[in-house]
Amino acid sequence: MAEIQKPPGVLVVEDEEVIRNMVVSLCERNGYRTFPAGDGIEALEIIAEHEKDILVAILDIAMPRMTGTELYREMILSNSKIPVIVASGFLVDKDEIIQQTGGTPYAIFSKPYALNDLLDKINEIRDREDS
C-alpha cells in the first residue's frame, strides 16, 4: 500500500499571535501544514521533532527568549537544510543576517508585508523542491 503524502510544512515563528495566526491561516488555506511557534526555543523543539516535514521556516527577528537571529544561527550550526524567510518589523539588512548567522535567508520581508507576496515565496520554494 502506498504511503499517503503529507502536505509540505511551514514553520511559522512569530511572537505576535495575531500575525502568527494570519500566516498560519494563509498557509493552511493554500494546502500547507503548519507548525506555529511563539519563539525560537519552541521552534527548535518543533524542528527537532518535525524537521523532515518542514519545507520552509518563516522567522520573526525580535522575539522573547530566543530571537529569530539566534534561532537561525542554531539551525545553521545543526546543519538544518530548511530554507528561511525572515519577516521583521525592523529594517533588516541581508548582509547583517548573513554575518550574524552564517546563513543566507531565501527572502526578507519587512512588516507590514503583503500576505500574497509571502505565499508566492513559499510556493517558489515548494516548486524548487519539487523539481
Image (cartoon, rainbow, N blue to C red):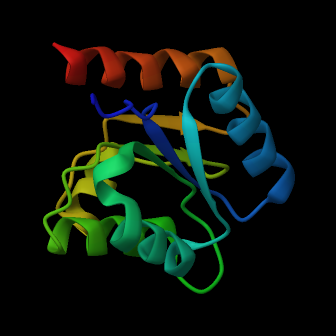
The one nearer the camera, 103 or 29, is 29
**Does residue 78 sit above or below 23 in this rendering?**
below
**Does residue 29 sit above or below 104 in this rendering?**
above
Q: Position of residue 78 (x, y in %)?
A: 17, 73
Q: Position of residue 36 (x, y in %)?
A: 63, 57
**Does residue 12 sit above or below 31 in this rendering?**
below
The one nearer the camera, 89 or 34, is 34
Q: Position of residue 42 (x, y in %)?
A: 56, 76
Residue pictured at 33% horizontal, 44% vertical: 94
Kindly give the residue lying farthest to the bottom in the view shown. 65
Residue pictured at 50% horizontal, 42% vertical: 10
Question: Which quadrant would the N terminus be assigned to in this image?
Answer: top left
Please tell me in which quadrant of the rendered image residue 77 appears: bottom left
Question: Which quadrant would the C terminus be assigned to in this image?
Answer: top left
Please tell me in which quadrant of the rendered image residue 98 appears: bottom left
**Does residue 65 sit above or below 128 in this rendering?**
below
In this picture, residue 23 sits left or right of residue 108: right
Kindly give the residue lying farthest to the front in the view shown. 1
Residue pictured at 62% horizontal, 19% vertical: 30
Count the numbered circles shown.
0
Residue pictured at 22% horizontal, 24% vertical: 129
In this picture, residue 98 sits left or right of residue 37: left
Q: Position of residue 85 (x, y in %)?
A: 43, 41
